[in-house]
Amino acid sequence: MENDRQTFTRSPLIRIFSIILGICFFCVFSIFAYEVFPRYVVFSFPPPIDDYGVDDWMFPTHATWRNWSDRYFVWRVETILVYENIPDDKLRESIVTYFDEKLNNSGWARAENVTASCHYIMPEVDFLNYLEDFSQNGYIAFIKKSDHDSFNWTNESTCIAIWNTSPGTFSVVILSARPSPFTRFFNWIFE
C-alpha cells in the first residue's frame, strides 16, 4: 500500500518536470529557428535605365556574413550601365538621384555617418571613397528612417557603389545587410 502511494506522488512531479522540459525545448527550438532562417532586405526596383535598355540586375546573391559574434543577412546585386555622349559627373549624379528617390520611397535615408556597415561588408569600399561629390567614383550608405536617430553600425543598412570602368560605362552594386535577431539582441544588451 505504501509503495502505491510513493509511485502516485512521484508521478505528478515527473509530469510537471516533463512539461517544463518540453516548454524549454520548444522555446530553444523556436529561438534557434528564428535565428537560423535568414530574412534579407531585398529591393524590387530595377536599375536605372541606360542607353541600351538594361532592365534587370545581374548576379543576385544571398549570403550570411559573420564578424566575430555578429551575423548579417546580406543581399547583393550588380549591373553595368552604358551611356553615350553625357559627361560622367552628370551620369553619376543621375544614378545617385535615382537611388535616393527609390530608397527614400522605401523608407530609407542617406546615412550621414560614413561608418555605416559598408566598411565591413562591401568589398568595393577597399578601392572607393565615400561619394561626396559627383566628379569621382564612390559609394553611398543608407539606413532605415526608423533607425536614423539611434544609428550604430549594427542597424540595417544599404550600400551602393558606383564607379567608371571606362568613359560612359558604370558598374553599380547595391548591397543590403540586416543583422540577425541575436546580433541585435546582444548589441542591445551590451550597449
Image (cartoon, rainbow, N blue to C red):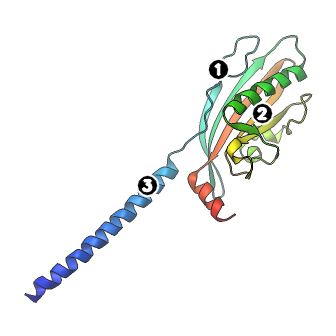
Give the CA separation, mark 2 to mark 1. Answer: 17 Å
Residue that badge 2 annotates: 161
Residue that badge 3 annotates: 30
The reply, left or right, for residue 185 in relation to residue 118 is left
Q: Examine the rendering and report whether any part of residue 105 can be seen.
A: yes
69 to 7, vertically: above or below: above
Q: Which mark is residue 56?
A: 1
**Could you say where residue 78 lies in the image, as x and y percent from the top left?**
69, 28
Within 10 angstroms of label 2, few (less than 14), some, or many (20 or more) residues?
many
Q: Secondary structure at mark 2?
A: strand
Task: Give the residue at x 59% y 37%.
Answer: 62
Task: Give the residue at x 86% y 31%.
Answer: 137
The amino acid type of the residue labelled 1 equals: Asp
Q: Secondary structure at mark 3?
A: helix
Q: Which is more foreground, mark 3 or mark 1?
A: 3
Quadrant in which the N terminus is drawn: bottom left
Give the CA separation, mark 2 to mark 3. Answer: 37 Å
Q: Residue furthest bottom?
A: 2
**Could you say where residue 175 lies in the image, as x and y percent from the top left?**
69, 36
The amino acid type of the residue labelled 2 equals: Ala
